[in-house]
Amino acid sequence: MDITTSIAKPDPAPPDVVVRGDARSFRQGVVAGKHHLVADEPVAYGGRDEGPGPYDYLLAALGVCTSMTIGLFARKKQFPLEDIIVSLRHSRIHAKDCADCETKEGMLDRIEVQVEMTGKLTPEQQARLMAVAAKCPVHRTLKSEINIQLRGAPATAP
C-alpha cells in the first residue's frame, strides 16, 4: 500500500479591501469588511462625482487616524478634551520650494493637516496631543518607506 502525503498550503489571508470597477467610468465599488463604499472622480475630471476620489480617501484615512490617536491618548491620560476636528488638504509643490524636504528636484506631494481641539486643555496638554498626532499609524506609514507589491492576475471573461 502506497501512502502519499501532501501538505496543502494554507489560503493566503483575505484582502483587507476589495475594489471593483469597470472600464467605462471612474466609479468604483469598495468593500472593506462589512462596509460598502463608493469612489469616483469629480465631473470636472470625467467622473460623475458619486463618491469621494482616491485622494479624498487617502486624506480621510490620515484624518481619521489622527483624530482617533489624539482621542485615545487624551482618554488614557484623562485630559479634558471634548472634540477634535482635523482638516486636510493635498497639493503638489516644487521640491525647491520646500525648505525642510530632502528632495530638491521635481515635484512633491504635500498634505497640510490642521488640528483643532476643544476642551479645557492646558498649553502643555495641547502640545502633547499635537506631538501624539504625528505618531498615528497612518501618518507613520505615509512618512516611511512603503513597499507596494503590485501583482496582476490573468484576465477572465465576465
Image (cartoon, grey):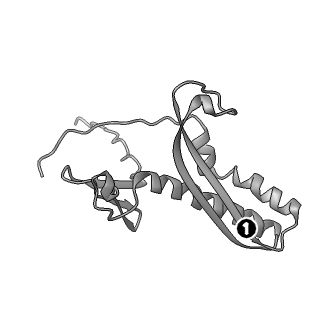
Nearer the observer, 40 or 2 = 40
The image position of residue 138, as x and y in percent, is: 59, 50
Disc 1 marks a residue whose amino acid type is: Met
User: Residue shown at 69%/50% (left/top)?
Assistant: 135
Give the farthest residue toward the left: 157
The image position of residue 115, as x and y in percent, is: 68, 60
The image position of residue 133, as x and y in percent, is: 70, 55
Nearer the observer, 56 or 33 = 56
When asked about the image quadrant of residue 151, the answer is top left
When asked about the image quadrant of residue 70, the answer is bottom right
Q: On the rendered structure, is 124 left or right of 47? A: right
Q: Which residue is mark 1?
A: 117
When asked about the image quadrant of residue 5, the answer is top left
User: Which element is circle 1 on?
Assistant: strand
The image position of residue 62, as x and y in percent, is: 57, 54
Give the farthest residue toward the top: 105
User: Residue shown at 60%/25% (left/top)?
Assistant: 104
Q: Is residue 42 above or below residue 147?
A: below
